[in-house]
Image (tube, rainbow, N blue to C red):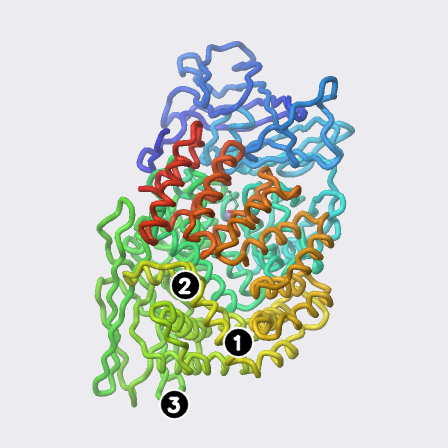
Amino acid sequence: TQTIYLKDYQEPHHWVRDVHLTFRLAPRATRVLSKITFVPNVQNPGDLILDGEGLRLIAVAVNEAIVPYQVTDTHLVIKSGDLPTAPFTFEAEVEISPQTNTALEGLYMSPLNVEAPEEGERESQPGQNAMYCTQCEAEGFRKITYYPDRPDVMAPFSVRIESDMPVMLSNGNPGAFGPGFAEWHDPWPKPSYLFALVAGNLINHPGGFTTKSGKQVELNIWVRPGDEGKCAFGMQALKDSMAWDERVYGREYDLDIFNIVAVDDFNMGAMENKGLNVFNSSCVLASKETSTDANFERIEGIIAHEYFHNWTGNRITCRDWFQLCLKEGLTVYRDQMFSGDMRSHAVKRIEEVLTLRARQFREDNGPLAHPVRPESFVEINNFYTATVYEKGAEIIGMLKRIVGDEAYKKSCDLYFERHDGQAVTIEDWLAAFADTTGRDLAQFKQWYSQAGTPRLSVEEDWQDGTFTLTFTQSTPATPGQSDKKPMVLPIAVGLIGPNGAEVVPTTVLEMTEATQSFSFEGLGARPTASILRDFSAPVVLEREMSAKTRAFLLAHDTDPFQKWEMGRMLAKDTLIAMIMDGTPPANAYLDAIKTVLTDDSLDPAFRALTLGLPSQDDLAQTLYDAGVTPDPDKIYAAREEVRRILAAHLREVLPALYVENDAGAFAPDAEGSGKRSLRLSALSLLTLSDGGATARALYKRADNMTEQAGALQALLSAGLGEDELADFAAQWQDDRLVMDKWFMMQVASAAPDQAADIAKSLTQHPDFTMKNPNRFRSVFGALAGNHAGFHASDGKAYALLADHLIALDALNPQTTARMSGAFETWKRYDADRQGMMRDQLERILATPTLSRDTTEMVTRILS
Ligand code: B3K
Ligand code: ZN
């Protein structure tokens, strides 16, 4: 295996002027004919180096003549001496087998059918439901044909598809079509990773959008027959995204048509191919009967994200894969702001921080920690991480907070104007800000290169009307980076007076030193500081605070994030005390929660979030950080105990909360989902004391999946709900996405000593398949996420997951590698558990022909 380094970047020896592709589709023998105009790069002359993997080469020509070439497993090379010095055409014909492509990278079929055709069976007859589909990012195009498969090579593509499929799609605008063929032309230069092709028996949900300059755009969501009723929400989200990008970023759509396709077999959420976004069906199909509020919110966010990539990623792309955060961090930031505008910024911010801490802080604290812009990789697919995406988005948020809204907008405009049509770097992005504002961003830039989550501690001082905050920052060592420098931290602070009124509104302190003081003068009385409002920097704030001060801020802080955070810290302290020595929850915590829950002036969604307890994984990390080896059984038991105590303490208010937050007729908006969320949080506690009566009644009556699944979940987490679980399967057996929930819920809420057995028995279920990533994740993602179940002391869950990762790796390395991250926290635990996890990791690593993807991940996890 070869490691690729950022420092080794070199321009290609050849640029591409245009690309013509013809696809003759057949399940096991698709022919791909390419005709590419190459232009020698005078800056960096050399051989023609084309990537290609798993291709059966039929023919090659240069300027229509035979040339000598070399083919290896990964490349086709023509020596510069055998090439014209002027631009030339390169032609190739290759054969590939989409039907057996279980890796779901390159051209593949959904569903897959890897069994060999029966004797005499015509191989060119895909099933009624089968579709051809591509996934090229990051390096999948090389599995389709020989090409310089790197993002800095951008070219317009013309595509002809020949097949019997009724619908045949590719990037750009439609050209000629007729029975058996369709042509597409994409005028915008793009890298190969944005190429897409889809063909199948698909039905469209149509729509339209008029851009701000009056251009009509045809919109379509293409789905399998039977799914047409689940497209309306996605279509609306797309139109909202198009309007938002015009209004907020001044970015208009640039083709006559925008197509979205839903596919059941997909390695991730969705893909932003130019003009032809391909979505995991779970991230686009929605109906009130089959999707929860969380699904709706996620779908809206992902549709926006992929659409926003049209400018941040497609029109301006990455020079090399080390720059991945250039498009991902920025696009996540943009989709977060969109969702905030569509729903509630306060609630959205809290949810973002929850995800950031659960995924990115976890990553940053373990063996997989890496900079937002990594310096090396073996397999780039392993770097589509929470760090690149979510920490990448936090960097954009900090930059905006530092330069201000107006300068942010000006800088973005300059970036778009300067780099349209180019493949660029983080340096280019930052230069647009430096040039607009005159600021030196050299220190800020460390956010891209220094891994690890900074720890920020604070001391307070009060003297003669002056309140001083002294901050100290440090970042723990991460793999390959032992010495850490001070970072630029925008710390948003507000001060609250003794009577609860705000005396200093939000002020952004810009910390640049290891230790730095900031003073507020002329105050009448010692204030209480609200620090890190809106979570203004992705750091761990280490602040000594009494429960009383926390409760005071929970009651009086004007910043919704900090208000929630105070409740969170109270809950965390309560849980830690319970874990350490069984200390029961203090009334300060219980009463504070009750006050928030019953405060009708607060958004129900916010109240529901305040009732939520920190996850077991979060508690394990907190203990580990404090030098205590986390005991998963104790954490589980303590959390359950606190839930029971909360339920008892809130006994009088829960039934009313449940009744009053009936949202009425279902609408997937912020208001309705907020009420349902509070209602279901109340129900979950209520179910601990009413024997499940309320949840059972809701389960029967529910006309939407949020409440149906919510009621079932409440029952399952109380150890009830067996009949409902069976009923659920009977009702939804024909809906793959809902059945994913059925698989997932059972494993997620299984008792610690049963999780592995339940997961194992589900793998024997006739509807379980290793070939569908959604189904695999619904069982094994849930197992890894069931903290006490995964870490059960018998080690069964570790072994079960390892068995299935080994089996999956032979089919789908990308999903295997990603799921191996379940083991990334192994060093937190006691020697027995560590030993068992190490054994499993070593067993995985010892698998003959283990993929490069999984090898890299497991090696890093073990290091
Ligand atoms: N750009 C894709 C992710 C591709 C992942 C490749 N392993 C989706 C997105 O971030 O929008
Ligand atoms: Zn993205």
In this rendering, is residue 114 above or below 514? Answer: above
In this rendering, is residue 314 above or below 636? Answer: above
**Residue at the far right in the pictured view:** 179
Q: Amino acid at mark 1?
A: Ala
Q: Which numbered disc flags the more N-terminal residue, 3 or 1?
A: 3
Give the residue at mark 1.
647
- Residue drawn at x 55%, y 60% as measured from the top left: 338
Judge: label 1 CB < 8 Å from ligand 1: no
Q: Is residue 171 left or right of residue 408?
A: right
Q: Is residue 840 left or right of residue 204?
A: left
Q: Amino acid at mark 3?
A: Asn
Image quadrant where one finds the C terminus: top left
User: Label 2 crowding class (10 Å Cα cut-off): few <14, some 14-19, many 20+?
Assistant: many
Give the residue at mark 3.
499
Q: Which numbered disc flags the more N-terminal residue, 3 or 2?
A: 3
- Residue drawn at x 56%, y 27% as measured from the top left: 144
Residue 274 is situated, as x and y percent measured from the top left of the image, at 58, 41
Q: Which mark is residue 670?
A: none
Cα–Cα gap, marks 3 and 1: 31 Å
> Which of the two discs, 3 and 1, sits closer to the camera?
1
In this rendering, is residue 260 above or below 43? Answer: below
- Residue drawn at x 37%, y 45% as measured from the top left: 836
Residue 702 is situated, as x and y percent measured from the top left of the image, at 71, 66
Cα–Cα gap, marks 1 and 2: 18 Å
Q: Which numbered disc flags the more N-terminal residue, 1 or 2?
A: 2
Query: What secondary structure is marked by label 1?
Result: helix
Residue 187 is situated, as x and y percent measured from the top left of the image, at 59, 36
Query: What secondary structure is marked by label 2?
Result: helix
Query: Which quadrant would residue 318 be assigned to in this image?
Result: top left
Give the residue at mark 2.
635
